[in-house]
Structures are given as structure tokens and as C-alpha cells.
Amino acid sequence: MKLKAIQYIYHQELDAIYDPNEVDSFFFILAESFYNITRIKLAMNPELAIDDMEKILNGLERLKNEEPIQYIIGDTEFFGLPFKVNQNVLIPRPETEELVDWVLNHQPPTTNHQLTILDIGTGSGCIAISLAKHMQKAKVYALDVSSEALNVAKLNAKLNEAEVGFMEVDILKIEERKGVTDFKFDIIVSNPPYVREKEKEQMKANVLNNEPHLALFVEDEDPLQFYKAITKFAVNNLTDNGLLFFEINEYLGGDMVQLLKDHNFMNIELKQDIFKKDRMIKGQIA
């Protein structure tokens, strides 16, 4: 079947759900991913046909169910690096790239030991691996409660030839894990679950129906549950002058500043993302 005919079917089936330009984008992403046929190649040869239509038609059905294109092709890009993704991990976001960039530009004062970094709730491993690639003299660790997520993160570390030490740990029960609390880190960074249940209605269906709720949502009654646990851990496990970085809920910036103040952090800075939303915070251990 000619690819142009399949492209027409895509528009017939998807234009009511997505913008037509987005439909074209989806079609060409899948054509290149599945058949190594680029937009330019098809423009130069409009009669181009394929025999095996199963993959691209299956992709069409998944798009009709509003499944993210990243899950359909199985990979994405973050901070200039390739990452495998599936429904066990969140799709890395541009604002998290901003967090990584912030960490890279605010390293602790020079120490006489190897710099150590911990990424809590690593998911796909995008933060830890990006830091490891750009801070090659540092020792980077990452933990997550999900063994399935860690399998993806380990695959991504191998894909990017990054050295990261992974641990399966529930940060809410970390004190029960002997040995983990003995480590000291110069930097602790985390993008934990921060979307309140009441904010679900603001989310797009492709996120709500596909990405792991374990990595997204917190109870309305205690939206800072993970931040409290991580901050408490950081107080005891950061080195002198160590830094704590968070990606945060845009509506809870003031609460996060107070949380760090309550734990005696200094040089607290609340930072907006490119969309002018309070999205990141850092503090230095006193």
C-alpha cells in the first residue's frame, strides 16, 4: 500500500482528535521509526509503498486511544541524549531538562573528594544519566520504588554508556533500608510525584490514561509527602554545604520554601521555568 494512502487514512481517523499538523508529524515519526522512511524521502518519491502495514496501522489505533507517540515508538530525547520509555516510566519533560541544567550550573564548592550525586525517584533515569554524562568525575546514584522503572533506567544507562548506581528503595521507608542511609551526597536531586488528585481534571487524556500514576499523583491532604521525606533524608545525608534540588508543583512554591526553611536550609532559591511557572527550588544545607 502506498504510504501517501496511509497518510490519508491517518487524517481521516485522527483529525477529529488532533490538529492536522500534529497528525502529519505523528505519521512521519512512525514512518521513519518503523520503516526508515523520512519526510523528504517520501516527498521525493510519492509513489513509495510498503508491504508490511501492521506496525503503522497499529500505531494509528494507539494514537486513536491517545497513547503518547513516545510510548508507541519506545524512545524519546532528553538533554540531547536518547532514552527508551514505556508505560512503566514518565515521559521526560522539557522542564526537567531545565532542572538538570540548573544542577550543572550550581555545583557545590570544590571538595577534596569525588563528587557524589543522588537522584531520588529516577524513573527512566533521565536526570541521573544526564548528570553522569556531563559530570564524568562524579559518582552518580539513583533510586526508585519501582523495579520496572529501574529496568528501563538501567537499559538507558547502558544505551548512553553512563555509569550510575541504581537502587530499589522506597523513599518513604528508606530508614528501613540498612546501608542506604550511611551514604553522604554532595547533591541530592528529585522530581517526585507532585500532582494532586484534584488536579487530574486539568490533565490531558494521553497523560492521565497512559503514564504511571505512581510517579505522578499525591493525595490532596498531603501534597508534600515525598518532599518532606526527601528533605528529612537530605538533612542527614548531605555533605557540608551540600545542595538539594527539586522539581515542584507550580502551585506549591511558597510551601516548598517554608519546608526548606523549617529544616534550616540556607540560600533557598525558587526558580521559574520557561513558562514562568514556579517549577524548581534549591537549598543548601546549613
Image: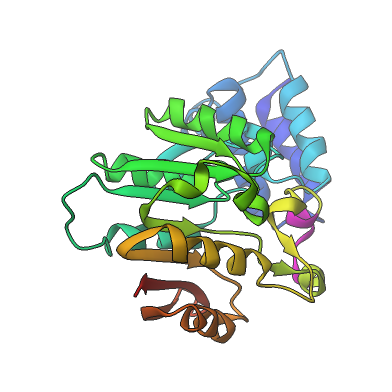
The residue closer to the viewer here, 249 or 188, is 188
* Side (left or right) of 137 relative to 204: left
Count the marks: 0
> Which residue lies at the image location 61% right of the left edge and 30% below the top edge?
151
Magenta residues: mostly which secondary structure?
helix
The residue closer to the viewer here, 195 or 21, is 195
Quadrant (top left/top right/bottom left/bottom right) for the N terminus = top right
> Which residue lies at the image location 71% right of the left edge and 13% below the top edge?
51
The residue closer to the viewer here, 82 or 239, is 239
* Side (left or right) of 149 relative to 131: right
Indicate whether 26 appears above or below 30: below
Residue 36 place in picture, x, y as percent: 53, 23
> Which residue lies at the image location 81% right of the left edge and 51% below the top edge?
209
Residue 96 place in picture, x, y as percent: 49, 58
Q: Which residues, given as a range, are shown in magenta? A: 202-208
Quadrant (top left/top right/bottom left/bottom right) for the C terminus = bottom left
* Side (left or right) of 83 relative to 209: left
Indicate whether 160 appears above or below 114: above
Residue placed furthest toward the top:
51
* Side (left or right) of 84 relative to 106: right
Residue 17 place in picture, x, y as percent: 80, 55
Residue 220 place in picture, x, y as percent: 79, 74
> Which residue lies at the image location 59% right of the left edge and 67% below the top edge?
227
Residue 257 visible in the snapshot: yes
The stretch drawn in magenta includes residue 239: no
The residue closer to the viewer here, 211 or 158, is 158
Q: Tell me which corner region of the image, top left, top right, bottom left or bottom right, holds residue 138.
A: top left
Residue 80 visible in the snapshot: no
Q: Tell me which corner region of the image, top left, top right, bottom left or bottom right, holds residue 129.
A: top left
Q: In this figure, which colouring scheme has been used for the structure? A: rainbow
